[in-house]
Amino acid sequence: MPRRLRVGVSACLLGHEVRWDGGHKRDRFVTNALGPWVEWVTVCPELELGLGVPREPIRLEGDPAAPRLVAPKSRTDHTAAMLAFVRARVDRLVAEDLSGYVLKSDSPSCGMQRVRVHRPRGGAPARTGVGFFARVLRERLPLLPVEEEGRLNDPTLRENFVERLFAYERWKRLAARPTRAGLVAFHTAHKLLLLAHDPAAYRRLGRLVARTKGRRAADVAAAYGAAFMDALAACATPDRHANVLEHMLGYVSGELAPEERRELVELIADHRRGLVPLVGPLTLMKHHVRRLDVAYLAGQVYLDPYPRELMLSAGPGSSRRSGAARARSR
Ligand code: SF4
């Protein structure tokens, strides 16, 4: 990568002592694994609003569809002030050229989903809230890959997020100066990655790129970018990885010795059945692609969607290692 990715982060996840009680929530994956690849843009909405450290804790309260931000002890209502603050703060973040965002879970300011919404007169809170900052961030930057640190403990969601960070970074470079030729080259390089995530989207995007006549390149690029990032939000599955690898096999099969072909076919089948991690057939496929110099396959982002060092640090459950069960990442 020519530069580190600029990624927004809830300040407490980096170890900044900005929480209501003066503590932090330093997250090891965020700091140790992502840190070397990232230039962090830190935000603590509650501190920056002027609530201070330590401060009275605040929470979402009232109507789950439109909760208020309240300090329950003093009954201070911070709703209007926080809304005005986060709108202005997110406006400034738009200029920061972010490639992603890691939010603190369960926070009435930063939580991305399932934040508790309390009832003023007691009773079990509804887990339906979204933090004030998180809501405005996602409305304003809908393509931005966003995750919570808690969900990043799931190897599949973690890998999906890292893939989307780097994909969005590549996409932004094209979107800054969209051309038809650039869009075709981008789509060509991402074909197999898309196929592993969402085969239907892969076909839709192919049609979009093929039918650009009479349309402004910027309009096509905008439609493509939204559908592209949405497709990558669907986590890849062992079955789809196996389909992609079988598709690749078609390009190299004629050049392989019978025993080489059999080895690859068996590894792909074993991955489909969950017996070997993706890294097995993928590494062998990469070896043959390099050895046989198959240009189309060598240019596929699918083979190296993010820096190898990051994959190694992704842990034993990484889907590129284990082929674990998948879920949509958002
Ligand atoms: S969760 Fe958000 S508001 Fe709360 S301390 Fe962390 S950064 Fe600040």
Image (spheres, rainbow, N blue to C red):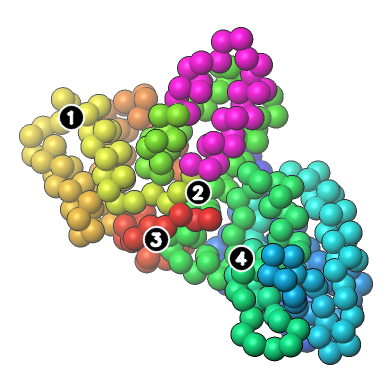
Mark 2–mark 3 CB contact (< 8 Å): no
Residue farthest left in this picture: 258
Find residue 61 and report its image quarter: bottom right
Whole-angstrom CA distance, mark 1 to mark 2, is: 31 Å
Which circle's residue, 4 or 3, is located before the other in the chain? 4
Residue 314 picture location, percent across and down = 45, 62
Whole-angstrom CA distance, mark 4 to mark 3, is: 23 Å
Q: Amino acid at mark 4?
A: Gln
Q: Which residues are magenta?
A: 205-231
Whole-angstrom CA distance, mark 2 to mark 3, is: 16 Å
Q: What residue is pinned by disc 2?
A: 233
Q: Is residue 144 above or below residue 127?
A: above
Local secondary structure at mark 2: loop
Residue 279 picture location, percent across and down = 31, 52
Q: What residue is pinned by disc 4?
A: 113
Find residue 194 and report its image quarter: top left
Mark 1–mark 4 CB contact (< 8 Å): no
Whole-angstrom CA distance, mark 3 to mark 1, is: 28 Å
Which circle's residue, 1 or 4, is located before the other in the chain? 4
Q: What residue is pinned by disc 1?
A: 253
Q: Which residue is found at the position 27% from the left and 48% from the top?
A: 239
